[in-house]
Image (cartoon, rainbow, N blue to C red):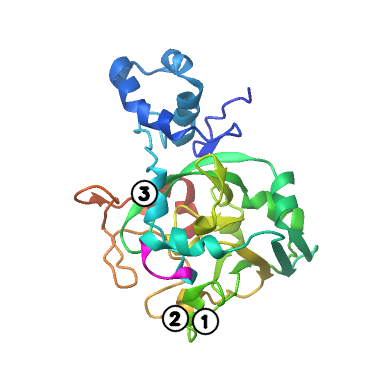
Amino acid sequence: MVPIHLKQPWKLPEQQVTPEEVYLKRRDFLKTMGRASLGAAALLMLPPGLSRLWAATNDTPSSPLLTPSSESTVSRYNNFYEFGTVKDRIWKLAESLNTGGWQIEVGGLVRKPQMLDAEKLIRKMPVEDRIYRLRCVETWSVVVPWTGFPLKVLIDQLEPLSGARYVKFTTFLDPNIARGQRSRFWEPWPYTEGLTLEEATHDLTFVATGIYGHSLPPHHGAPLRLVVPWKYGFKSIKSIVKIEFTKEEPETFWQSVSPLEYDFPANVIPHQPYARWHQEFERIPGQKGTVKTKLFNGYAKQVAHLYK
């Protein structure tokens, strides 16, 4: 068994996401054990899936466990703007996306410009499992278990040049299958997003290749997508076909559509209204009421220093 590294609480050190049924049993276990008694000895008594979950999702030793949203909820309450705006239809509409032979172009200010074969890349990269909050700018949130690798690992292999300050990401362009690109042809397709190089190489920034213990389906951004948990969800671009290192801040899709509403950082800062929504509260699909939004979506301890 690979050791559990408690110093990085967002990481799952083993290569299989804890099954959903194990997540759902955690409450029964905690009721039996009692939260106060769940110390080191009790942790050793946990079933393997629960012990990994405890190590991976606690922000501090005393914080509550993150409870992943059900896969059906995450799949049926999902945005993929290329395929439309009706959340509960995206999973079906995106089935037309063929990811066979997927290629990713790497260019710009990088020592090793190249074309990457997605399947080969996924096979050779180290595998990690992480459970992250995902906060949409539309003021709803879910908790998702991902499989993939830290973006930093890939960037280190590509060796950006000293002049690189930003990383720009681009998704596919195919109006024949993506009805959003066809029906809203005046928008600045293909979809683009970007990060500073410092953000891109932060330990939290993740390239997801799987979800809920299986490969990413098309509606979640197959074959690989970005996950940046302290930013609004639209920063986590799906189905990446190009990675470009730049000196200047790249213009992104939503900045181009509405520059007065969307800025480049797009960090989750509750007291600041963003786009057309107030952001102090969020709703959880399938639940009543709202909850308070956390600063940087709950990851302030890890990322706040980036913005001082």
| Residue beneath the point at 33% across and 50% down | 294
Which residue range is magenta in the image? 83-87
Q: Which residue is nearer to you in this view: 141 or 210?
A: 210
Mark 3 lies on a secondary structure that is helix
Check residue 257 in the rendering and tell me which mark sits there, or answer none: 2
Q: What residue type is labelled 3?
A: Thr
Disc 1 target residue: 188
Circle 3/circle 1 CB separation < 8 Å: no
| Left or right of 168, for residue 269 | left
Mark toward the start of the polypeptide (2 vs 3): 3
Label 3 environment density (alpha carbons within 10 Å; few <14, some 14–19, many ≥20):
some
Check residue 73 in the rendering and tell me which mark sits there, or answer none: 3
Mark 1 lies on a secondary structure that is loop
> Which image quarter is the N terminus in?
top right
Where's residue 272, x and y in %? 31, 65
Q: Which residue is nearer to you in this view: 306 or 71?
A: 71
| Residue beneath the point at 54% across and 48% down | 204
The residue lying furthest to the bottom in this view is 186
| Residue beneath the point at 47% across and 75% down | 180
Residue 216 shows in this picture = yes
Where's residue 299, x and y in %? 43, 47
For the residues labelled 3 and 1, the Cα–Cα distance comes to 30 Å
Label 1 environment density (alpha carbons within 10 Å; few <14, some 14–19, many ≥20):
some
Q: Which residue is nearer to you in this view: 148 or 58?
A: 148
| Residue beneath the point at 73% across and 69% down | 107
Circle 2/circle 1 CB separation < 8 Å: yes
Label 2 environment density (alpha carbons within 10 Å; few <14, some 14–19, many ≥20):
few
For the residues labelled 2 and 1, the Cα–Cα distance comes to 7 Å
Where's residue 275, x and y in %? 34, 72
| Left or right of 149, for residue 297 | left
Q: Which amino acid does label 2 sit on?
A: Val
